[in-house]
Amino acid sequence: MKLTAFALLALTTLAVSSCNKQKAAIDARADATQNAIDHEKEAVDVAAKEALKQTNTNAEIDKANIEAGKVTDQARLDAEKVKVEAEAAAAKARVDAEKK
């Protein structure tokens, strides 16, 4: 009887021990998965910040190009205006010269 009780106790201990090992393995897998997810979330966050930074840089470049284009166009138009005024003055002077 003592041998049977001892064998039953040994089997129960073995079963509980085996169960605890399986639970520990499950916990280890869950922890590893959660760590991997956390690292992936961090990588996504870093990538998003970098993309936002690049977008802001591109926007600043676009704004500078637009401003430069505006200044260039205004200078060209100012030069055309002066040219037209000079041509008009020359034409008036010719008319005045022809009358004399």
Image: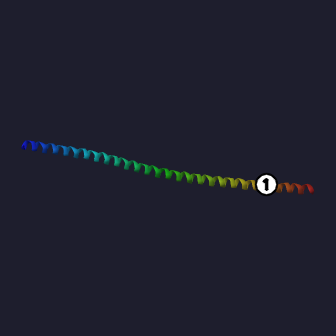
Q: Which residue is mark 1?
A: 84
The residue under the point 69% across, 55% down is: 74
Q: Is residue 24 left or right of residue 80?
A: left
Residue closer to the observer: 83 or 3: 3
Give the quadrant of residue 18.
top left
Q: Is residue 39 left or right of residue 98?
A: left
Residue found farthest to the right:
100
Disc 1 packing (10 Å; few <14; some 14–19; many ≥20): few
Q: Position of residue 91 (x, y in %)?
A: 85, 54
The residue under the point 72% across, 54% down is: 77
Q: Is residue 83 left or right of residue 59?
A: right
Residue closer to the observer: 68 or 26: 26
The residue under the point 19% across, 46% down is: 16
Q: Position of residue 71 (x, y in %)?
A: 66, 55
Which quadrant of the rendered structure holds the N terminus? Answer: top left
Q: Position of residue 57 (x, y in %)?
A: 53, 52
